[in-house]
Amino acid sequence: MKYAEFKNEVEKGNAFSIYLFEGEDAFFREKGLTCVKNAFVTEPELNCAYFEGEKINLSEVSSSLSQYPFLSKYRLTVIREFYSKKEGLKQIANFLENPLEGSLLAILNEKPCEALKGFQSVNVVDCSKSDAITIARWIKGTCINAGVAIDMETAKTIAEYCALDMTRVCQETEKLIAYKLDEKLITSMDVNDLVNRDVEYKIYEMTEYVGKRQFENALSVINDMLAKGETLQKILVSVYNYFRRLLHVAISAKTDAELAQILGIKDFAVKKAKAQASKFSKRALKKAVDALYDTDYLIKSGAVDADSRIWLTIFSIMVEGE
């Protein structure tokens, strides 16, 4: 189920025996757990048990799941990052098939676990990253509740700078609200000055400058990343992955939704990638990907000096983009 559907069910007082909060956004996973705990568990220090990782003792988990709640309608067992094949679930299979009344299980996983989804009692809550518009609405609502105004375009910029990561979005929004509480207004200038851009966004920004032939601005973005602690090697890998994405969307005949699934990104990011890819010829994108791959290989094999070769490769991409 979508995260919004899950919240609606909780607000109605409907508890499911087993929740699988699955997706890359830790904010939604932890927020979902908090919603369940606050809504259905009293005396959480007595009625909550926590386990983490594949090496957990499933006998202890099974014991927790079979205990009755104390001064509460429900007892909650929480497992984080639990990935197991079906045969590894034998000790808790009875609960997964026939959950005990009064006992809740919440599993928080960043990655999929198909074995868990094979049980009908497991309710999967989608905790993947949301899209920019939805996050912008959340930012605007949060600001309004705090008595601070912000327009949708500025809120959308915050979402993009944070690469749609809700943990970062929440932190940056709280920082902006605190900073602008007296003035009651957050502007695009405030966002540019105060919000730290995610590395992925900076790579997008640099590529946009290259596509527009604004090479000084592109170099300025790279120097800014270096000044903030990013290594040239990491920048090289990020640029390579980004140009590979641009090449993929440029040559593919698949729909945005299909590309989003293949690349593991949102439709919104596919549209942005297509817009950027259109600023380059397919030949230029292919040469850029090849040059970045070759440079990475030569550096890792010790055949060339990392610093000078990376700069030469980036300059060659700029020239090829013309």
Image: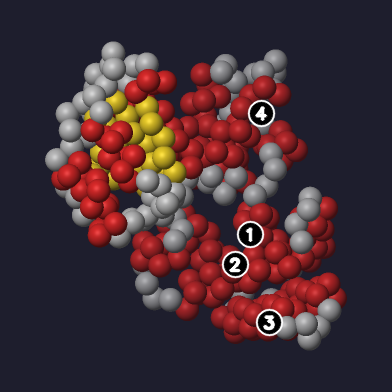
Q: In which quarter of the image is residue 127?
A: top left
Relative placement, left or right, of 198 versus 259 is right
Q: Nearer the viewer, mark 2 or mark 1?
A: 2
Q: What element carries label 2?
A: helix
Residue 190, placed above or below residue 204: above
The disc label shown at residue 204, or none: 1
What scheme was used to colour the molecule? Answer: secondary structure
Earlier residue among tags 3 and 1: 1
Is residue 39 visible in the rendered image? The answer is no
Question: Taking 189 as reference, is 128 left or right?
Answer: left
Q: Distance between the residues labelled 4 and 1?
A: 24 Å
Q: Is residue 157 above or below residue 266?
A: above
User: What secondary structure is marked by label 4?
Assistant: helix
Q: Earlier in the sequence, mark 2 or mark 1?
A: 1
Residue kind at label 4, given as amino acid type: Lys
Amino acid at pointer 1: Tyr
Instruction: Looking at this view, name the residue that lies furthest to the top.
Output: 71
Q: How far apart are marks 2 and 4 (CA)?
A: 29 Å
Numbered badge on residue 242: 2
Horizontal arrangement in the rendering, residue 308 relative to residue 242 (left or right): right
N-term mark: 4 or 1: 4
Q: What element carries label 1?
A: helix
Q: Residue at x 68, y 82 (%)?
A: 297
Q: Residue under label 3, please give it.
A: 297
Q: Residues within 10 Å of mark 3 (few under 14, many from 20)?
A: few
Q: Do labels 2 and 4 touch, CB within 8 Å? A: no
Few, some or many residues within 10 Å of mark 2 (<14, 14–19, 20+): some
What's under tag 3, amino acid-wise? Tyr
Residue 155 placement (x, y as % from top left)? 57, 36
In-image side of 11 versus 250 (left or right): left
**Three-letter amino acid code of the residue under disc 2:** Tyr
